[in-house]
Amino acid sequence: MKIVLQNLTKVFPSRNKKSNEEVVAVNNFNFEIPDGKLIGLLGPSGCGKSTTLYMISGLQKPSSGKIFFGDDDVTELSTENRGIGLVFQNYALYPHLTVKQNILFPLQNLKGKDKLDKDTMLKRAEEAARLVQIDQLLDRKPSELSGGQQQRVAIARALVKMPRVLLLDEPLSNLDARLRLQTREEIRRIQKETGITTVFVTHDQEEAMSISDMIVVMKSGVVQQIGKPQDVYDDPANLFVAKFLGTPPINVFSGLVKDGTLYIGSDAVMEIPDVADQDVIVGIRPEGFILSDTGALICKPVNVEVMGRDVSIVTTHEASLNPLVRSIVNADNRLAVTGEHVRYDIKPHKIFIFNKKTEERIHFMR
């Protein structure tokens, strides 16, 4: 099911009685979510991603704009009539019901022409449980399950209605690191097997990038960039996107373009003849550094962290806007880090420059 968001806006009244200034939670959101894809809505707390999800679900009404499921305008349609499955962060399972009863619950509330007989409901519940691999746990209560198992029950309950759209609101936030990894892989597997158009809300960029077909990066209610995860990482539209994506985060420096050369502090790191002279902000991905005895960027070493396959070299630089500069190099190079300075060449496709005032990306010939 294709989802179209057309000029979608949500404005909340002010909570400050003195200023009476309205809060724009989502501002003019336009996007077409392709049929059968998993889309990650990504951004920090308060960016508008959950509000967008709630408008798609019908739990909140847009201040303006339209929402289409396929060719159907569902903007004014109630939640129960949209054909959605919704999974919340806190699972929202009924503690006094078994796993089977929790999964059956939405089917038992169907009325009229949608009402199902008992055998059909049981079959659907068992199929949903099997899909999320909890079919051996149907007689247990939620208190007898791990966090990951409870989350699977919540997903099965959403899927049992055979929804047109699956909506997941921070579904992994309550899980430990290992369970998050396992459960996100399960979500991706389930989504691929069912082919249900899915919208996944998270503040965790690693989660969004690992399972999404496309990501939507948001800030203060405004869409910053939309694209395939790797494309957005490799080609950020602005400094916010560049800083938000990536672990470890991108290294940021104050820089200067003068006479066709990019300077970081006093280090002339790259020729960029197609960019006008100006002060800039420079971003370098941690994997963008190449250890070299004659490297153009000169840093002071602080520490070397061995991570098995790779090594993280921690340094400082006078022009760095972060306290530390972190580079990731192959473990074979760790012995090259000696003396009072570490010198790097920079991979051209891993360095970005941004307008100092607007923080928008400045493109240059590489």
Image (spheres, helix red, strand yellow):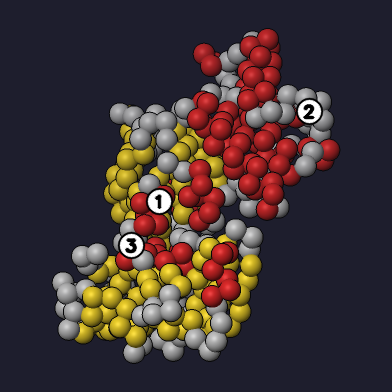
Q: Residue at x 46, y 47 (%)?
A: 40
Binning the other alpha carbons within 10 Å of mark 2 as few (below 14), some (14 to 19) or many (20 upward) gives some
Binning the other alpha carbons within 10 Å of mark 1 as few (below 14), some (14 to 19) or many (20 upward) gives some
In the image, which disc is placed on residue 137?
2
Q: Quadrant of the C terminus?
A: bottom left
Q: Earlier in the sequence, mark 2 or mark 3?
A: 2
Which one is in front in this view, the residue at disc 2 or the one at disc 3? 3
Secondary structure of the residue carrying tag 2 is loop
The answer to whether residue 312 is visible is: no
Which one is in front in this view, the residue at disc 3 or the one at disc 1? 3
Q: Residue at x 55, y 87 (%)?
A: 339
Q: Earlier in the sequence, mark 3 or mark 1?
A: 1
Q: For mark 3, what is the residue?
A: 349
Amino acid type assigned to the residue bearing label 3 in the image: His
The residue closer to the viewer here, 220 or 228, is: 228
Kindly report the distance in space between the C-alpha atoms of the residues bearing marks 2 and 3.
50 Å
Which one is in front in this view, the residue at disc 2 or the one at disc 1? 1
Amino acid type assigned to the residue bearing label 1 in the image: Gln
Q: Earlier in the sequence, mark 2 or mark 1?
A: 2
The x, y position of residue 365, in whole percent, is 21, 65
Q: Residue at x 38, y 31 (%)?
A: 35
- Asked if marks 2 and 3 touch (Cβ < 8 Å), the reply is no
In the image, which disc is placed on residue 230?
1
